[in-house]
Image (cartoon, rainbow, N blue to C red):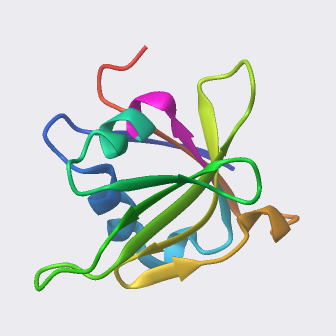
């Protein structure tokens, strides 16, 4: 089942994903380029290349937040990045590519993005 998650202006996409909790464990999640851009412009993020040819967005742990790691792979010619694995607060899932029959397919987009 397809679900669209719209991230309201002024809200962090990571918060929206973390609020989903266990509901996103057996899903495929696609991040719109607007979400990736929003995350990548955070001054605390470290951006690197992932072994799968995608990119890693990484935030070091602070007193207020745990370490956060997001790995995504872009589909050439599209505005979507497939979230291949993530560690966001209390939720962590690995290699969503291995989920052959997802319970949901979630498309995450910033409010107002085309």
Q: Position of residue 46 (x, y in %)?
A: 37, 57
Looking at the image, residue 32 sits to the left or right of residue 79; the answer is left
Looking at the image, residue 3 sits to the left or right of residue 20; the answer is right
User: In the picture, residue 98 is in which quadrant?
Assistant: bottom right
* Residue farthest right in this picture: 100
* Residue farthest top in this picture: 114
**Closer to the camera, 97 or 59?**
59
Q: Which range of residues does the magenta coloring cover?
A: 29-35
Looking at the image, residue 25 sits to the left or right of residue 9; the answer is right
State the residue at coordinates (34%, 45%): 39
**Closer to the camera, 10 or 87?**
87
Q: Is residue 52 above or below residue 73?
A: below
Say whether residue 108 is visible: yes
Residue 36 within the segment the image draws in magenta: no
State the residue at coordinates (38%, 34%): 37
Q: Is residue 39 above or below residue 92?
A: above
Q: Position of residue 15 (x, y in %)?
A: 27, 61
Q: Position of residue 63 (x, y in %)?
A: 11, 86
Q: Is residue 42 above or below residue 26?
A: above
**Closer to the camera, 96 or 55?**
55
Q: Quadrant of the C terminus?
A: top left
**Closer to the camera, 4 or 29?**
29
State the residue at coordinates (73%, 18%): 77
Q: Position of residue 32 (x, y in %)?
A: 51, 33
User: In the picture, residue 35 is in which quadrant?
Assistant: top left
State the residue at coordinates (28%, 39%): 41
């Amino acid at each position: 089942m397809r679900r669209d998650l719209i991230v309201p202006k002024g809200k962090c996409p990571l918060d929206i994903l973390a609020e989903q909790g266990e509901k996103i464990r057996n899903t495929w999640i696609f991040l719109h380029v607007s979400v990736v851009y929003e995350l990548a412009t955070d001054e605390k993020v470290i951006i690197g290349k992932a072994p799968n040819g995608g990119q890693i967005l990484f935030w070091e742990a602070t007193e207020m937040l745990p370490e956060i790691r997001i790995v995504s792979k872009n589909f050439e010619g599209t505005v979507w990045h497939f979230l291949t694995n993530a560690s966001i607060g209390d939720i962590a899932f690995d290699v969503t590519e291995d989920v052959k029959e997802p319970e949901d397919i979630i498309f995450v987009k910033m409010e107002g993005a085309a």
